[in-house]
Amino acid sequence: MGPRYLVQLVASTVLLLAGVCALNLIIDPAGLYGLRKNSPEHYARVLAKSEYGLWWPADSFDERAIKAGLLRFGPPADCIVIGSSHAMQIGSAVLPPSLRADCGSLLNAAVSGAGLEDHLALAAITRRSRTPRHIVFGIAPWTFAFGKDVRWTRYADDYAEARRLTQGKETTASPQLDAIRNLVSLEYTQRSIKAALKRSPGQQAIMPAGPPAIDPEMGGQHAVLRSDGSLVYSADYIARASQAAIPPGGSAYKTEGALNEPEAIALYRSMLEWLMREGIKPVLLLTPYHPTVWDDANSANRRAMLQTEAIVRDIARSLSLQVIGSYDPLLTGCTSSEFFDFMHARAKCLDRLEVLPATAGVAQ
């Protein structure tokens, strides 16, 4: 291998990386770099003022940036919802409105796959931007563990702030370095290529979703984010989900590996105590899984739900917090027809959660 070959190899590698960076900057499928005319923050501003919400096509604006923007620019709300996609359909714009016993108005900041780090970061953004009466935390079976989802790094500074406020600790995460790494990541490059092949440049425009309002049971051409941040699935997703068979135990989404780590539980508890000192009353929300998931006593999902719900109720008792709902659909009265898939309940099921007796708990 001669020097000339090495020079050519290095030059080719540099050109390839430069091309990948240029592609990701120009296409920027999640709008992370602010070079497109429309940014996630602008989307959030328009969303907050919309009547029926906005279309949210696949591979368009990054949902974490949208929800952070909505917390900063959205209207006042009695309650903020923070959690994973399990809680994304909860909102004031839902009919009937969600959690109406405690929340006259509600803003949904839940994001797909949210992990512990998302909860802390979004809590820090909430406290910096507003002082709601309640923050409703949708606790997933994987919430009390670190590193269950890497997408939180888009607001790493906010996570660092939350760690400092709750524990006096700093994080070594660097959002600037993460942004540079993302420019050459395989996953983001694949998204850019897919977006470039799939859409014309004009399709990145922010588009109102109505009138008329989209039927959340049927969906529309794309997913819709309502003005309160709650989600309406696309017709394509609803159709595919309804046709998919649910095996006993369901799919092990984020429920394998480390769960309910003592340090993570302690950190989460510290966050709740910090919010209480700030005059915000946390509420802990548990959304049920499909009945078939509970049919396998040895499934990773069932084991995780039993352990996590017990921890949630123990934290609630010790801090005198309200728990809404349960992972167990038998306790919430949710039937098989009231789920999109194995872990996402429909509005009819979610509407029952707040009337569940406070002493309820999952069966062993």
Image (cartoon, rainbow, N blue to C red):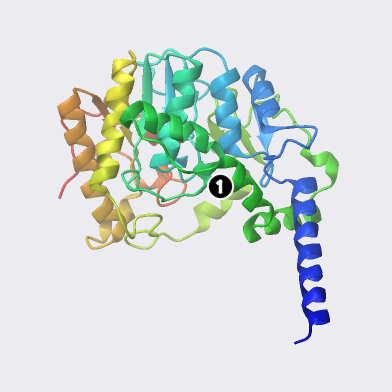
- The one of 337 and 170 positioned closer to us in this rendering: 170
Q: Is residue 163 above or below residue 98?
A: below
Q: Nearer the viewer, residue 353 or 149?
A: 149
Give the x, y percent position of residue 269. Answer: 26, 32
Picture quadrant where residue 316 is located: top left
Query: Which residue carries the number 1 mark?
Result: 238
Callout 1 secondary element: helix
Please tell me which residue is depicted at 33% across the width and 21% down the height of the picture: 275
Q: In the image as oriented, which residue stretches furthest toward the bottom?
A: 1
Q: Is residue 155 visible?
A: yes
Residue lying furthest front: 3
Name the residue rendered at 75%, 61% in the picture.
17
Q: Quadrant of residue 207?
A: top right
Residue at the (48%, 19%) spot, across then down: 128
Q: Is residue 278 left or right of residue 266?
A: right
Residue 248 image point, x, y percent: 32, 62
Q: Amino acid at mark 1?
A: Ile
Measuring 49% from the left and 49% from the top, which residue is drawn there? 150
Q: Is residue 237 left or right of residue 260?
A: right
Side (left or right) of 239 relative to 301: right
